[in-house]
Amino acid sequence: MTDEVGCLKAQLEEKDKEIVALKNKLAHLEKSNASVLELYEKVTPLTPLKAKASLSNEDIMRYSRQLLLPELGVQGQLNLSKTSVLVVGCGGLGCPLAQYLAAAGIGRLGLLDYDEVELSNLHRQVLHGEENQDQAKALSAANAVKRLNSTVECIPYHLQLSSENALQLIQHGKPLVSAGALRMEGQLTVYNYRGGPCYRCLYPVPPPSETVTNCSDGGVLGVVPGIMGCFQALEVLKIASGQGSSCSQQLVMFDAQDARFRSIKLRPKQAGCAVCGENPSVTRLVDYEAFCGSAATDKCRKLNLLSRDQRITVQDYKSIIDTAEPHLLLDVRPLVEVDICHLPTSLNIPLSSLEYRKSEHIQLLQESISQLKQQMEGDCRPPVYVICKMGNDSQKAVQVMEKMSGSEVDSITVKDISGGLMAWANRIDPTFPQY
Amino acid sequence: MAAPVVIHLEFGGGAELLFNGVKDHHVTLPSQPDPWDVKQLLVWIQQNLLKERPELFVQGDSVRPGILVLINDADWELMGELEYQLQDQDNVVFISTLHGG
Ligand SMILES: [Zn+2]
């Protein structure tokens, strides 16, 4: 009898455990189904984040390794959970930034990006995967972040930060943790924080637009923005948890080649600053693109330096090759790009060598032109076609070569190939690599 | 007569591309009647080091907007900007600001 009672009790206990496990499984599934994210195409008002009174058992388990840090502790964790952070750009910096903020338990993450995921982003924008190509970066990043921590509220914005929407997205006077990375270098500064300078204090005059390089034309090793994005996450977490950042009025520079960090003391908040000074003249937002004379996106600008008769299309060039018309094809890209891909007959002389009349290159050019001239016999102005990646540098090169024609080299007819090698790859030869 | 001044110049954030990609330059500014200041240094750099487009480095008699100048690890604004008198062994950094990543 007692045996039977004991046996039934044990069976019941087992079934109870099974029920708990099934309930957990169901709750988990419901949670992940509820997290299908909506992509915002415009800014809408959000309900204020509610402060948590205490940490749940699940919170304690999840964040235990950081709760053990006296610098953070329970209060710091609760502070994180009531903080909203807007990540502007879900690229090489924004991906690791968003990832670590979500992992650490930030309350709300706005993820803003106007762009879609491309294959050439994946080496540095590590939240996106191959299957996310052509998807909005903001949504791709939000989904990745949600998988990591479903308790973080994610709001993906598929738009560009502008003077119209910035004030709707960002409350006045919020600290800005800003970073940049290019080639093998990174920089980081915290603006608007504890009496430090604002961006305008440091840069009262916009830089000339042609000097603002961005990743699409500069090249960058993916781990470099990765390190800087992690660094941004660190400073955001210190500010949000209440420890405070020591990067106000500091410029931190990272040299990835020498593996060296340096910190430089910047000027304090400027009394005469047009934005945060004593008599601010900028009382509403100005249009950045108008202020800088440059687009706020990292898309390549198309130059138009030449007249129509100074340019040919890739189709025109294809028929020049097909009819075996004698000519010189000059590729003016830097050597590192020529190593990636080039047309078989091209002569490579980088634009900078032409601009600075690098003697060995000018000699090479002279020789190639006079050879062509001999080959053509009667014709006194042999044709030179200039190509580059997108058709900007090739136009500059045509302008330089027109000055050289008849003096530094024999008289030539020089034209550029509109759209460059990328147009060639798109319209003529689909097997030609794109980068 | 002020004695020659030996200083360390550094270019970064892309500004080094105007100097043949070389980031570090140890230079000796020759002896001259008055002490060297940063304004004269900019002229000297243009005449002696600048390999590429000067408009990307200077504007008027100062550096172009977007380049930060740091003297001995401090913003030059804290040091007197163009009027700062260079001392032997000073470290002067010219750094372009990076955008995006
Ligand atoms: Zn300011």
Image (cartoon, rainbow, N blue to C red):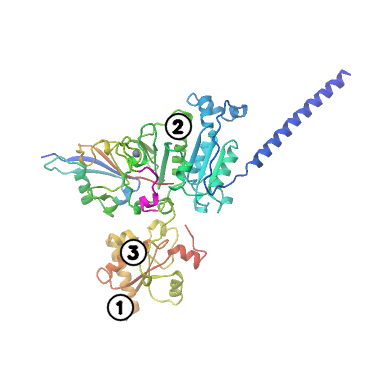
Q: Position of residue A363 (x, y in %)?
A: 28, 65
Q: What secondary structure is found at the residue carrying circle 1?
A: loop
- Was residue A229 drawn as part of the magenta stretch in this picture? no
Magenta extent: A282-294
Q: Chain of mark 2?
A: A
Q: Residue at x 53, y 32 (%)?
A: A82
Q: Position of residue A110 (x, y in %)?
A: 52, 41
Is residue B78 something that shows in the picture?
A: yes
Residue position for label 3: A397
- Was residue A283 drawn as part of the magenta stretch in this picture? yes
Residue position for label 1: A380
Q: Nearer the viewer, residue B84 or A42?
A: A42
Q: Nearer the viewer, residue A357 or B74?
A: B74
Q: Position of residue A241 (x, y in %)?
A: 48, 29
Residue position for label 2: A239
Instruction: Give the Cα distance between marks 1 and 2.
Output: 70 Å
Badge nearest the viewer, 1 or 2: 2
